[in-house]
Structures are given as structure tokens and as C-alpha cells.
Image (cartoon, rainbow, N blue to C red):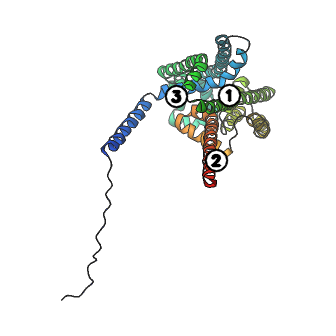
Amino acid sequence: MRGGPAPDPTPVRRTIVEFPTRTLVRVVVALIIFGLAVNLLATLRDVVVWTATALFLAIALDPAVSRLERRMARPAAVLIVFGLFALGLLVVIGALMMPLITQLDEISKHGPGDLERLARTGPLAELDRRFDIVAQVKSHAGAAPGLAFGTAGAVLNGVLAVVTVLFLTLFLLLDLPRICELALRQMRPETRERATAVGQAVHRSVGGYVAGNLLISVVAFLVTLVSLMVLSVPYAIALAMLLAVFDLIPLVGATIGSAIVILATLATTGTSEALVMLAVIVVYQQIENHLLQPLVYGRTVQLSPLVAMLAVLSGAALLGLVGALVAIPIAGAAQAIGKELLDVRAARIDAETESLRAVEVQ
């Protein structure tokens, strides 16, 4: 006989997991539908972004429409509010674009002559003799406006996007009450009350944030405009408007806009004026961050700095500038929805606990 351990008489247990055919079919169909939905969203990305932007603007403008609606019919109130918004948008675009167009025209006309004078007497003389810089700049000077604005197709697409968003915003403002009423009719009475509360919280969060953000940007525009005019900086209105537009972007926009204004002041006036402008902006930013923002946002969007930063980064990664602009109010709306869901869950748990206690007593 051969020695060795005796074989283990315990049979090997095998676990077989069976999935019903119906379940497998449902999973496959769900994956196919998900893939088709993702492809459809990728194809219609521009339309989705336009619609989301228009919905955000409609919710933001609706509080002003509701106030005017107390004195007149809703269509008239919508036309007044929307007309003022569109007019303000055109003023902002005109204030930003006209100085840029003027300076590009001046650069294309006078830039080569100024560069030629520098090449004869300045430090560029040796470089011009070796690389013929002046001739290269002259040959490409006429293309400066085209390079700045891009192709005509890109400009046309931008105009089309703005016009589309504006019309979608107008239509949503007109139909927003009916859309909300239609959605509420599809819910049960108890769910309808919670949805109404969540909708009011989202309405208050988005509307309050947009109104507060615009108010702070107006203050930034006035402070910057007065400072630039006192320092005799060229194109003060355009630079102040540029900073106000960047100030709409949460967290990082004011820093970027301030840097552009300070560099423009340094390039057009001098070092001392730029240092004065730097001091003004630093003082104003402290007042805005520690006084204006808590005062304006405190009752509308209550988010921690970490959540706000993550929201802005995520919005910028998904939708670019538009995502960064709408990230914080959307995060505030999501916070209101999450709070309502947690409150409902807590109420259900309390009800179940009370039922178990009643059963134990019996």
C-alpha cells in the first residue's frame, strides 16, 4: 500500500447563479437604450446646451415677470422684462466689441509704420536685418481683423446660437406656468405638495443667485469705470464692462478680469497707474468677497466653498463657460432637491419606527 493522506469525502459544492431570460433581455434592452440616448445627446449637444441655457434664463427672469404680473397680463410683463434683458445684452456686446474693432483697425493701419520706426532706431534693428520682421508684419497686417474674429461661419454660428437661446427663453417665459401646472397634474397629491416646495426652493435659489450676481457685477463695473476714468485709461467703459462680465463667473472670473484690466492699464498708461488700479481692485475684491457676496447670496444659495468650487469645475468641464456660469445655482437647486428627499426619507423612517413600537406594545 502507498501511504498518504486519505481523500476528502466531502463533496465539492458548486453555486450556480441562474438569471431568467426576461431579466437578461431587460438588461440588454436597457443598455441599448442607454447607448442610443448617449449618442443622441452627443449629436444634439448644441440643442441641449441652448435649451438648458434658455431654461436657466427663463427661471432667472421669472421673478421679475411675476412682480410685473401683479399689475398687467403675463404676456405684457414677459415682453417688458425680456426686452430690457435683450437690450442690456446688446449694450454689453456693443461696449465690448466696438473698441476691439476700432483698435484692430488702428493696428492694421498704423502698426507696420510704428514697427518700422522701432526697427530703424530701437532694439529690433538687428533682428529686422536678420529675419526681415517688418516685411513679414506688413504682409500679414491686413489679416489681423480676420484672425481676431475667426471665419465668417464661426461668427454666424455664434449669432445663431445667441438668437436661438433668446427666442427659446422668450417662449419658455410665456409658457412656464403652464409647463409647471402640467407637470404637477401628473403627480399624486402628496407628491405634488413636495414638488411644489422643491420648485419654489429652486426658483428662489436660481432667481436670487442671478439677481445677486448681476447686482455685484454692476457694482464692479461702476467701481472699475470710475477708477479707470480717474486714471485716464483709454477705453475705460470697455475694460470695466469686460471685468463685469468676467465677474459673473464664480470664484475665478473676477481674478481673470482684474488681471486683464491691470495689464491694459500698464500697457496704455504706465506703472504707477497700474499699481493704483491693482490697489483699487484688491480692496474692492475684499469688500465683494467678505461683504457683498455673503449679504446677497446668504438667503438664496447656501453652499460651502468646497461644493461651490467642485460645482464650477464640473460645470466648466461639461459645458465650458456656460457650465461655469450656471454651476452654482444648479448645485443650489440640487441641494434643495436632495434636502427634500432626505426629509421625506426621514419622515418615512420615523413613521415605520412608530408603527413597530405600536406593534410591540400590543
Q: Nearer the viewer, mark 1 or mark 3?
A: 1
Residue 123 percent coordinates (x, y): 62, 37
Q: What whole-number distance in Å separates the C-alpha atoms at marks 1 and 2?
A: 34 Å
Sooner in the amino-acid sequence: mark 1 or mark 2: 1
* Residue 156 visible to the viewer: yes
Residue 48 percent coordinates (x, y): 50, 27
Q: Is residue 284 rendered to the left or right of residue 355?
A: right
Name the residue beneath numbered marker 1. Answer: 207
Residue 205 percent coordinates (x, y): 67, 32
Residue 165 lies in what quarter of the image?
top right
On screen, residue 203 above or below 314: above
- Most extreme residue toward the front is 362
Element under label 1? Answer: helix
Q: Nearer the viewer, mark 2 or mark 3?
A: 2
* Residue 119 visible to the viewer: no
- The N terminus lies in quadrant: bottom left
Residue placed most toward the observer, 193 or 110:
193
On screen, residue 306 above or below 6: above
Sooner in the amino-acid sequence: mark 2 or mark 3: 3
Residue occupying the point 81% across, 27% down: 230
Residue placed most toward the observer, 173 or 248:
173
Counting other residues with Cα less than 10 Å from the Cα at mark 1, is it few (<14), some (14-19), or many (20 or more)? Answer: many
Disc number for residue 218: none
Residue 42 percent coordinates (x, y): 43, 32
Name the residue beneath numbered marker 2. Answer: 350
Element under label 3? Answer: helix
Residue placed most toward the observer, 9 or 351:
351
Counting other residues with Cα less than 10 Å from the Cα at mark 3, is it few (<14), some (14-19), or many (20 or more)? Answer: some
At label 3, which amino acid type do we have?
Val
At label 1, which amino acid type do we have?
Gly
Name the residue beneath numbered marker 3. Answer: 49
